[in-house]
Amino acid sequence: MDTKLFKFLKPPQPPKKLKWKMDAEPELLAWSIRARNYNVFLGNILFFILTTLAATVSIIIYSVFKKTGQPWGLLWATFLFFVLVSLIFYGSHQKVNIAYRITPSGIEYCKWKYAIRLNSKLVGIISIFVTVAFLSLAITTSSLSLVALAGPGGMGVIALMRLSSKKFRDPNTEYNHLEFKWRQITQLAIATNRDVVDLKYTYIDDGHETHWNFNIFCEKGQKESVAAVIRLHLSPEVPFIRAKVNVPLSTE
C-alpha cells in the first residue's frame, strides 16, 4: 500500500517546470535527494535549546492548571509541547530538495524548497483548542488576566495562519537551477564528515575571476561512485583529496 508516509520517504520528484539545460546529452548519473544544506551541529544545538524552553513553558502551564484543580491540565501542556516542538523542528531541521544530472559536458542541479503548508481546517482546530485553553486559564486563575493570556495566544494562532497563507509561502519558496562545465572545476574533494562531494570551481563575473565551492549531496554510500564519475571528466592536474567539508548556508 502506497501511503503518504511512504511517499514522503521517497526521493523528491523534480519540479514540472524543470528543463535540463544539457538535456540533449546522454545521462551518466542522475538522482534527487532531500538534504540539510547548513551546519548540522548548530542546527541540533538550536533545536535542543528551544525544545528545552518549550518543555519549561509546558511545565509552567501544567503547574498553573494543577493549582486550579482542572483535570485536563496535562492534556493542554502535552498538546502545547508537541505543537511547539513541531514548529521548532521545522525551523531548525529544514531540508531542501535537490536534483542532479551529470553528462559528458558537466553537471547541473536544480534546488527547490517549498514553505510549510498547513491545512486550513487544522489551523482552525488548533486555534479553537488554544482559545478554549486560555479562556479556561483566565477564568479559573485570578492571578492571570485575559489580556495577559490573549497576547501570546493570539500571536501563536496568527503565526500558524501566516504559515498556511499563500502570501507567506510564495516568497519563501526557492527555486535555483545552475550548471557547471568540467573546465570550471579546480578541485574535487570527498567529504569525511558528510555524504557530500565538494567541488571548487572558477567562473568569470563582470570580467573578474571568482572562486567558489559547490556541494553535491549524495545518498549514504554514494559519494565514492559519484566522485569516481566526476574524476573521469576532469583534467589530471585537478587535485583530488579527502577532507572535512564545511557546508555553507547555501549550495550556490
Image (spheres, rainbow, N blue to C red):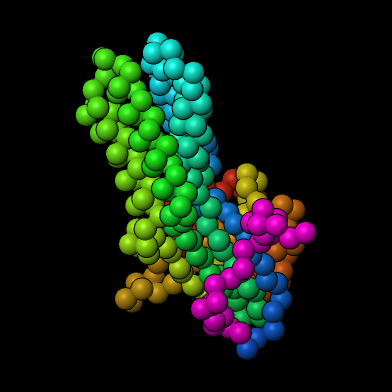
Task: Depth check: give the residue in front, 138 or 106.
Answer: 138
Task: Depth check: give the residue in front, 19 or 21.
Answer: 19
Looking at the rendered image, the quarter that the N terminus falls into is: bottom right
Residue 109's x, y, as percent? 55, 70
**74 vs 33: above or below:** above
Q: Residue at x 62, y 68 (%)?
A: 13
Image quadrant of residue 101? bottom right
Magenta residues? 1-23
Residue 8's x, y, as percent? 64, 56
Task: Depth check: give the residue in front, 38 or 225.
Answer: 38
**67 vs 195: above or below:** above
Residue projecting furthest to the right = 1
Residue 61 falls within the magenta-colored stretch: no
Q: Is residue 235 visible?
A: no
Q: Residue at x 49, y 72 (%)?
A: 177
Task: Depth check: give the residue in front, 58 or 50.
Answer: 58
Residue projecting furthest to the bottom = 24
Q: Is residue 167 visible?
A: yes
Image quadrant of residue 232? bottom right
